[in-house]
Structure formats: structure tokens, C-alpha cells
Amino acid sequence: VSRGLWKKYGDKRVIDTPITEMGFTGIAVGAAMAGLRPVCEFMTFNFSMQAIDQVINSAAKTFYMSAGTVNVPIVFRGPNGAASGVGAQHSQCFGAWYSHCPGLKVVAPYDSEDAKGLLKAAIRDPDPVVVLENEMVYGQGFPVSDQVLDKEFVLPIGKAKIMRPGKHVTLVAYAKAVETALLAANELAGKGIECEVINLRSLRPLDSDTIFKSVQKTHHLVTVEQGWPQSGVGSEICARIMEHETFFHLDAPVWRVTGVDVPMPYAKTLEAAALPQPADVVLAVNKVLGTK
């Protein structure tokens, strides 16, 4: 992702560090407090656990604890979620972990448009932003419009995107799971079931309004994510539906499609079984719609 930046900007702006996450994250947070806008890259967000004190206690809480006098404009970015054959300690999703914390903003891009627009927004933001990328889409090509290619293109943090309109059921996903939802929607379209697919883009703040409006139209909801089921992003969406008048628009219970509640296996076949697949989404849609 950072290829070519050192040659362009030099070692005053692109700094290689020893692999000590607590150390280089603390340096980056301090630089942000001093007025810079650092982008702190983790080789994988699994390693951000080594620096969790700096991310949460030093970055996320400082603006509140200083009564609004100290901003920490920092970006934490890197690969998140399942990669390929890297095992339990390099494959977990931190979407729910970081979006639980006040003081952080959390975005999870899916395609090239998301990656460019959300990263630029994160760098411009006055507060700490966690950018959860997915290694599996780094080499994947996506169509982009002239608008996206424009140098000034930026996406707002906290606004979801409807990737595919539909009228029978709403599928809400983020990051790589958006692809899973879209593939399932394509399959279901052949059976006459029109899925509205929402790409969350932002996990905190969460665009509840877009979800509410869609569910009030389709009357059915399935959430899709690679993370574990307990206390997941899908769970939060379910809670918000329950606490809002949108609950009364549901014709069936909400169904969650998640990663299996186990550490990620290493074997390829078991890894695939532990992650949500389009077939799982199709099954969930059939359950909420009462179809086969």
C-alpha cells in the first residue's frame, strides 16, 4: 500500500521502525498531539493488540479527558480480518473491537472507491480514525468512475452506500463481506428475490438511517460479517432495530451471518468453513423470507 511513498517523500515523512508496536504507535500518537497528522501502519491489525493501550487510552480518550483542548488527528491502518492460510493469530476481524470504543472513528473499505475516499477522509479528520482494510482485496480490481479518480475525491465518514437496490430483503455488510453479500444477491436474483445490499463503509459512526430506511422498505434484514457472532457489528445493528420504530416494520426476525465462533483454522478447507460464504447468506435469506 505504501509502495513508492519513501522515494516520493523521503525519510522525513516515511519512517521505517523496529517491529515494536507499542513503541512506534506511542511515537505516532505523540506526534499527532504535537500537531502532525501521522498515518500509523500495522503489518496486520492482529498486532495492534500489542499497542492497544496507545490506541485506546492515549489516542481515543485524550480529546475527552482534555475537555476538548487536545486533538489527536491520527490514522491507524492496515490489514484486518481473514487473509489466506495465515492461521488464528493473523486472521481475526477487529471491526467490533474498535467500534466499541468512544473517541475512535472506524471505517472498513470494500472497493477502490472506498479505499481512496475513506483514507483521505481519515487523514483530514481531527480525531483518531481506524481504517480496517482487507488483505484479500489488495490485488483485486474494481471499476472506478472519473469522479473517484478526481484528486479532490473524499467520502464522508459515517455514510453507508447502497451497492444494489432491492425490495424483498436488506443485506448489510462491510469490507470483504460486501462481496459475499453481492454474490448471494446475484444468485437470489435468479430466483426472483431482489436483495438491497448496503455497504456500511463506516462502523463508528454507524449509518443507522440508511439501514432503517431500507428495512422499512423490504421488511427483512440479514447482516453479514467475517467477525465472530457474539457482540458483533450485526448484533449492534439488531439492537438498534429493536430500539427504533423500524422494529415494527419487520415481517420476520433479523438473521446474522458471521464467522464461526472459533479461532481461525489453518487448513484451507476449514478456513473456508469458518468464514461466511454466499451459500450461507442465501440460506439466511430463505429463512427470513420463508422461501426455498
Image (spheres, grey):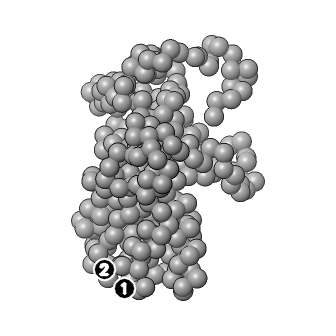
Q: Nearer the viewer, residue 261 or 190?
A: 261
Element under disc 2: loop
> Image quarter for residue 253?
bottom left
> Image quarter for residue 263?
top left
Q: Amino acid at mark 2?
A: Ala
Which numbered disc covers residue 119? none
Residue that badge 2 annotates: 252
Element under disc 1: loop
Judge the density around disc 2: few (<14), some (14-19), many (≥20) Cα neighbours within 10 Å: some
Point 62% across, 18% down: residue: 13
Q: Nearer the viewer, residue 257 or 69?
A: 257
Q: Position of residue 49 (x, y in %)?
A: 36, 30
Is residue 14 toward the left or the right of residue 272 in the image? right
Q: Position of residue 191 (x, y in %)?
A: 54, 85
Q: Nearer the viewer, residue 231 or 246?
A: 231
Disc 1 + disc 2, Cβ < 8 Å: yes
> Can residue 6 be seen here?
yes
Judge the density around disc 1: few (<14), some (14-19), many (≥20) Cα neighbours within 10 Å: few
How far apart marks 1 and 2 lie (CA) works out to 9 Å
Q: Nearer the viewer, residue 10 or 266?
A: 266
Point 50% across, 50% down: residue: 268
Q: Position of residue 32 (x, y in %)?
A: 46, 22
Q: Nearer the viewer, mark 1 or mark 2?
A: 1
Q: Quadrant of the C terminus?
A: bottom left
**Is residue 16 placed above or below 80 in the rendered structure?**
above
Is residue 39 toward the left or the right of residue 153 in the image? left
Point 38% across, 63% down: residue: 257
**Is residue 31 placed above or below 89 in the rendered structure?**
above
Point 63% across, 34% down: residue: 1
Residue that badge 1 annotates: 290
